[in-house]
Each structure stands twice: as structure tokens, then as C-alpha cells.
Image (spheres, coloured by chain):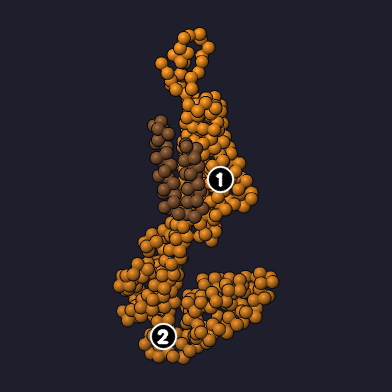
Amino acid sequence: MRMSLLGLILLLLIVAAVVQNVYVGGIGALVLIVVLVLFLSGRL
Amino acid sequence: MAINTGSATANPAANIVVPVGHRISWGAVFAGVSLLLALSWLLLLLGAAIGVGIADATDLEAMGDGLGIGSIIWVLLTSLVATFAGGLLAAKLAGTPDDRIGALHGLTVWSVGTLLIMLLGASGTGSAVNAISGALGSATQASTKVVSSATDSDDSGLLPDSIATSVAAMLKRQASRVISTTATGDDSPSRGEIRSAINSMSAEDTGAIASALVSGDTDLAREQLAQRSSLSSSEIDSIIQGAESQAEQWSESDDLESAENWLGEQIGEARQSVSQATSDMAGSEVSSRELNRALQELDSETLAEAGQYLLMGEPDMSKDVLVANTSLSEADIDAIVKGAEQEAQQLVDKAQAQINETTETIGTYTQAALWSAFIAAALGLVAGLVGGHMGAGTIQRLYATR
């Protein structure tokens, strides 16, 4: 679960960088922050 | 999963000792950060060697295309690989069996590494170890260069000094034309006096026009001749045609001096005919002494000051400067300023357009560099977490039990 979420974020960020798209990058960053908060609070 | 600590008790889970606090191994984190920086540097070198490095700040044309897809991919790859390896090493060296603690070690490696790269970037050495730091440094350097070159002049509103010099020269030429056409009288100036006055005005431009001719840029030379001399278009055409036939010889020897001499002769001949025509028009209003005095009064300081006001869009102030510092008549001054005003505006517009274009180029580059920096940092975070997770032991989760 944790690894697949990180994999998804990784993919989103790489796509955002290659196509230079702010929206895709923004969504990737948002999901990353949410996952990070969940991970640090022990819910993931 | 419960761990049997080896003591013989009825309830083994009750004797599990879970280390609380000091679960972070700073030695392992330090090792991870060292690996991160070293790998970043290694991959930066490799990127430069295989040609996917970042554009140089001096190459504005390359910067105009942004970072380039190869450079972006390389920056991301560097960040991913270096942080993953750093996190993996830190978690392994920490020797923790808990993959959560391992991932936290990876996260710490990423954060300490990012902090170090930021500090190195601020001290100016970041570009040596990190590709994205180099790209950002490059963008900052280029912006600084443009801003400093654009603000060299103090009062003329972000225009380079060369424009102010050109406007001063233009004012002088304009003054000469006006004085020459009004300098008519029995005691009229001699042909030689007028010729030397006109010649002295455009001497500074001959070198620039000769360079354009030697490099084969006849359009530029034609434009410069039209702008900086009082020659007619047919005279300019004949000079350019002559230059084209000579161009092969110049380019073979790369002899700028002979080109300059040739150009000087050609312009001299053309001017001689202009001077002849001007002298022939001589009437009875201004003496040669008055003409000489007027030209001498147009010293460089007065011209520079009047030029500055023209650049600032205040022709009235420019006229006031000429009135205060010369004995020219109001009508002459009006004619001088009116003639120079339009040319000055063209120069200002051209310089402004060039500055805007350069600023836009650097803006595109900086935007691409910042975007890549953000994505690379976020990818580094993920890679650190994954690396730490994978570097920890095989135990999925260690629960404390009483």
C-alpha cells in the first residue's frame, strides 16, 4: 500500500516534469504531502 | 509479530524490550548524506560529459529554449538515484529492523542533504555538487548580468550607456546639419571648415561600420551608414557595392584596418561633394567665426546632458540645456532637438525591445529551472522514503506490548 502510493506519486511527478505541466505537478505534490502526513502520524 | 527475548517466562510477549528514544542513528544519516552528495557530484560530471548538462549563463540562445528535455530528465534521475542510495545506506547502517524507522532515516537523509545543498548554493559552491543548484545559479547569474548591464546608466531609465553616447553623437550631427544649412553669408565658412566639422562628427562610427563590412553584414553597414552619416541613399549604395567587391580580399586577410581606411576614403569623397554643395549654398547670415564658435560650444558635457533629457522624453529640458550652454539661436536649437528627438526615440525603442527579449529568455529559463528544482526535490523525498524503507530489516512492523 505504502510503496504503491509512493510509486504513483513518483510517476505523477516524473510526468509533470517531462510535460512541464503545473496541474499534474501540483496534484503530485499534494498527494505526496498527504501521504507524508499520514506516514508520519502512523496511519499509513 | 512478537519477539522472544530468550528469557523463560510464561508470557514471552510481556518481556519484549522495545528501545524507546535514540532510535535515530546520526552516524548512519551522516553516511547517507555523504553518499547523496558524492553521487550527485558524480552524476553531474557524467551528465556534463555526455552532453545533457545545463545551459551556460553566457549562452542566451541556449537558455531561450529552457532547460531542454535531456537536462530535465538528467536532473530528476540524479536526484532520484542519489537520494535513494543515501536513504538505503542510512537505513542499513542504522541496523533497524523496523521499515518505518528505516524510511524515517531516508527522510532525514533527504532533509539534511537538501539543507546542505541549499547552504552550498547560497555560498556559491552548490553548482559543484548538484545539477539543479547549478541550473538555478546559472539563471541567477544571467539575471544579474542583464540587470547590471541594463542599469549601467543612472538617469535614462534602464538603458545602457551606449545609447546615451549615440544620442549625444546624433545631437552633434544634427547641430552640424542645422548650422551648415543656416551658415550662409559673404563671410561664409570655407569648404574645408565645414568638411572638417562634419568629418569630426562621425569619426567614432567608422570603426563600427567597417567591422560590419568586414564580417559581410552589408545590411547592418547600410543601416549604420544611413543612421550615422548625412550621406544620401545613392551614395550609401555605391559605398556598399564597392565594399562587397572588396569584401573577399578583407575576409581573406581579416584586415580590419584596411577596411577602415577604405571606408574612410569613400565617406570622405562622398562628404566632399556634400561640403561642396553646402558651401555653394553660402549666403549672408552667419560668419565662419560664428559657425566655429557654435561647434566648439557643443562640448561633450553639454551634448551628454541634452541627450539624457532627450532619452528621458523631455525635449524642452534638452532645449533649455542647449540655450543655457550655447549661443545658438532658439530656431536652431528647435531644429536640432526636433531632428534628434525622433532618432533618439527609435534608438530607445530598439534598446528597450532588446532588453525585453533578453529578460523574457531568462524568465523562461528560470521558470524551467525552478520547476525542475521543485520536482527534483519532491522526487528526492519519495526516493529517500523508499530507499530507507528498503534498507531496513525484513520486519514489517514492531509493536510494543506490555
Name which of mark 2 and mark 1 comes first in the sequence: 1
The location of residue B318, given as percent across then percent down, is 33, 71
Residue wearing tag 2? B181
Eye-nearest disc, 2 or 1: 1
Residue at image position (48%, 89%) is B277
Q: In this rendering, do the residues under marks 2 and 1 share a single chain?
A: yes
The location of residue B32, given as percent across then percent down, is 54, 32
Which residue of the protein is positioned furthest toward the front in this rendering?
B10
Chain coloured orange: which letter?
Answer: B
Residue wearing tag 1? B77
- From the viewer's side, name the closer residue of B180 and B338: B338
* Quadrant in the picture for residue B171: bottom left
Q: What amino acid is found at the position of numbered circle 1 in the picture?
A: Leu
Residue at image position (58%, 39%) is B39
Q: Colour of chain A?
A: brown
Q: In the shown orientation, is residue B217 left or right of residue A43?
A: right
Q: In the shown orientation, is residue B217 left or right of residue B202?
A: right
Identify the disc placed on residue B201: none
Disc 2 to disc 1, how far (Cα)?
A: 71 Å
The location of residue B397, given as percent across then percent down, is 48, 26
Q: Is residue B82 visible?
A: yes
- From the viewer's side, name the closer residue of B353 and B9: B9
